[in-house]
Image (spheres, rainbow, N blue to C red):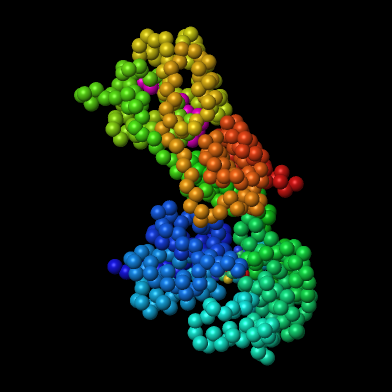
Amino acid sequence: MTGKVWLVGAGPGDQGLFTIKGLEVLQNAEVVVYDALIGDAVLSLIPDQAEAINVGKRAGNHRMTQEQINRTLLEQALAGKRVVRLKGGDPFLFGRGGEELELLAENDIPYEIVPGVTSAFAVPAYNGIPVTHRDFTSSVHIITGHRRSSGNTHSVGRAEVSRNLNAPGNAGSLSDPDGLGIDYEALVRTKGTLIFLMGLSTLPVIMRGLLDAGISPDTPAAVLERGTTAGQRRVLATVASLEEESGRAQIKAPAIIVVGEVCRLADTFAWVEKLPLGGKKILLTRPKELISGMAGRLRKMGAEVLEMPSIETVPIKPDPVLDECFKKDPDGSCEPWTRAGRIDWMVFTSPTGVRIFMDWFLSDHDIRALAGIRFAVIGEGSAKKLRQYGIRHDFMPTIYDGETLGRELAQKIRMERSGESGWSEEPKSPQTRVRVLIPRAAIGSRELVEELEKAGDIDILDIPTYTTEYVNRGIVDVREQIEKGEIHYAVFTSASTVRGFSAVMKDADLSRIKAICIGRQTRAAARAQGMETRMAEKATLDALLEAVVQCAAEDRT
Ligand code: SAH
């Protein structure tokens, strides 16, 4: 059976500007063929099981010719795949979307188009520039500032044009002296807003063309770099001074040029930088349970959020100690407190730990077999997860970290032993030793166990039930971004995540990012990797968010 191709606009960068339809289609894709200029956060939505093919072109480094791209789409569709062709902005605006459809149409491949938010309008909007305004202009024009190069043309007529352009000095014809094919006089006559895409390298030529066509040199003009991302920058000048100002600011592609009175409004209407986290790029590392909800809240405050997409929790099983603890009688019943050593306490140090244990346990046991065991959790997240399985925790420390959990739980156990506690229920059997089962991550912190041991007469079963594995798919080059200083903060919720993350980043210089951490162990692990750190007051999303906002406020001053 033939597959199908969806030509999807990814928007200008900000994940929130990716359409709902685009997202639905992407989540269903088996193959994703994507360009450069797709926002990282949109790329991280590519499903893990989809094959991701990068055909992005970076300056001077063509990964695939247009023809090869067209053929790839055809081949994948003929192989029966659901193919998403993900393109920056809107697929039909200077995106060669039309060319990519030709071969599909010829071969009767079904396709759909999902338009996208174009950078031509979104980037000015994110800089406080309305592309039209009744007081200034009644039309807007979008123009490409790109010179056609040879080799990418596919019809005779275009090939001829391209030969002209590649004549020495790009002389072009009389009516097209600079080879850009722009009718400057017509543009100037419209008195409309002019928006140039792909025009950064030809900016001087374009400004000259407009001036020669009689535009006032004082006409406001702007160049807007990497709009809608945390890296967005703008230079406001005039047609006469834009080249110099843009050069001074070292503006780099991707950037758009806007010419017209509306550029003046940026000073009044600019809004992104007023958001608490405007201009900040934040890396979120999983485990997902604690982090879900975090990305959305950070984005609402203006941050660009990159979720490290491929950190996986892998259960370790079976574990002989766990199996023994919860071994069933031949009649199918299972009473952990009468078996080889009863269990008095179970301690959970993460929501993931709760999930992994409970899913394992319930796959073969009845929940009532846990009756009589008391549950300690490290914090709110684990407590919430436990409640989802119908269990309320008996103990939570005052500060959400392993050391405090160990110390305060040990204290409680000691008090109960000496009869000081308010715990009314009689112990199941007279006992001196208390048994504590800790099913948790393979690289859990030592402090929890050390503190518990201080209570004396405690048997601790510290069981690794899962590992956190980092699979770097390489769709987003996080490492490169860290080295370039593009990622400002990274949020870590456990020491094991810090270590796993550092391992996958190999010898990257992590001193360039500030780690926002939950708990002292996490902070210590981040420090050990050379990161600057800040610790959230508590292990809650609110506290983490507060810490991020504080960092941003400090960095601004
Ligand atoms: N189809 C795309 C445009 C493709 S041409 C769209 O609708 O947006 C590529 C050009 O788009 C770049 O050279 C640059 O001029 C512009 N562009 C795309 N994303 C941009 C961004 N985030 N900030 C500034 N310019 C951008």
Q: Is residue 317 above or below residue 190?
A: above
Assess whether residue 320 is covered by the magenta stretch.
no
- Residue 367 in sight here: yes
Compared to residue 429, the image places residue 57 above or below, namely below
* Residue 379 rendering spot, x and y as whole percentages: 51, 31
- Which residue is at a point 42% across and 22% down the rendered structure image? 461
Furthest toward the left, the residue is: 331
Q: Write down the quadrant of residue 384 in the picture.
A: top left
Q: Residue at x 64, y 40 (%)?
A: 531
Magenta stretch holds residue 374: yes
Which segment did they paint magenta?
372-382
Q: Residue at x 54, y 55 (%)?
A: 476
Horizontally, is 484 left or right of 398 in the view? Answer: right
Q: Is residue 548 left or right of residue 67?
A: right
The image quadrant where one finds ligand 1 is bottom right
Give the position of the N terminus as an image quadrant: bottom left
Q: Does 153 appear above or below 376?
A: below
